[in-house]
Amino acid sequence: ELHLVESGGGLVQPGGSLRLSCAASGFALSGFEMHWVRQAPGKGLEWICYSSYSGSTVYYADSVKGRFTFSRDNAKNSLYLQMNSLRADDMALYYCTREDKGGNTNGGFDIWGQGTMVTVSS
Amino acid sequence: QAGLTQPPSVSKGLRQTATLTCTGTRNNVGDHGPIWLQQYQGHPPKLLSYRNNNRSSGISERFSASRSGNTASLTITGLQPEDEADYYCSAWDSSLSVWVFGGGTKLTVL
C-alpha cells in the first residue's frame, strides 16, 4: 500500500525553526514530483512548495520563500522541509503529497499523508 | 499570488445535482485545467480528478470535471449524504511557477 507519513511538527516560538520529514512507503520517491501543502486551523488548503524528481528544481509560494527549504533524499525515500523564522501565520497542519503524472492525466495530488501540526506561539 | 475563486458554500437536496465552479486565469485554470479534491473534516484531502478531468482511481462516476475557458466545474449527480464535504480546486500557474488553490466550497446535502 502507498503511504506518506509526516513527522517533526510541534510547538515553536515565533522566530524559531523546525524541520519536518515525510517518509514514503510502497513506492519509490524518485519517480515522483512532490509537494508540501498546509492548512491553518479552520482554513483552506495552501500550496507552499514543490520539488522536481531529483530535487534540483524547487518552487516556493511567496509566503514562505526565503524562510523554508524543501529537500529530498531519494535513497532514504524521504522529504524534508526546513522552516526558519517561523511566524504566527505559519501555524498549520502540514501535508506532503505526491504528484502523479502517469498516463495522460497531466498531474494530480494522488497520495497524501495525515499531516503534522506546527504550532507557533510564545 | 491570487488564488482561484470558488463559491464558499453550495446547498442542494438529496439525489439532486450540484455544480461547483472554480475560476482562474488563462495562466492556470485556462492553461491545463485544475485538479479537484474532496476533504472531510479532520481528514486529509482526497483526489477526485486529474488536470485532464479524468477521475482518480475509485472515484464514483457521479463525479465529473470539465472546463470552459478560465472556469472549471465539478458536477456531482445523485447527491448522497456522504457527498457533504469541502471541495477544493487547484491549478499550476505557468506564469508564476506556483500551484494555486481555491478557497474551497462547502457542499451541504439537504
Image (tube, coloured by chain):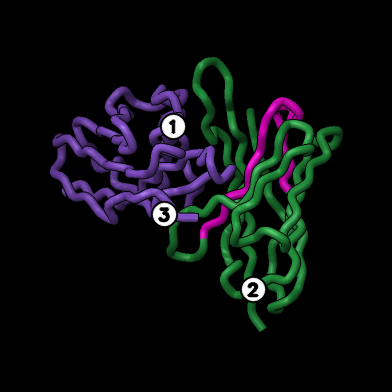
Residue B58 in the figure: left or right of residue B14: right
- Point out residue A6 in the picture as x, y percentages from the top left corner: 68, 49
Residue A97 in the figure: left or right of residue B87: right
Start-end of magenta stretch = A22-39
Shown colour of chain A: green
Residue drawn at (72%, 58%) of the image: A68
Circle nearer the viewer, 2 or 1:
1
Residue A54 in the figure: left or right of residue A34: right
SS class, disc 2: loop
The correct choice, above or below, for A92 with respect to B52 in the image is: below
| Magenta segment includes A35 | yes
Q: Which residue is mark 3?
A: B41
- The disc label shown at residue B31, or none: 1
Q: Nearer the viewer, residue A45 or A116?
A: A45
How busy is the neighbourhood of tag 1: few (under 14 within 10 Å), some, or many (20 plus)?
some
Q: Which residue is mark 2?
A: A87
Residue drawn at (57%, 35%) of the image: A111
Q: Which quadrant, please, contains the N terminus of chain A?
A: top right
| Magenta segment includes B107 | no
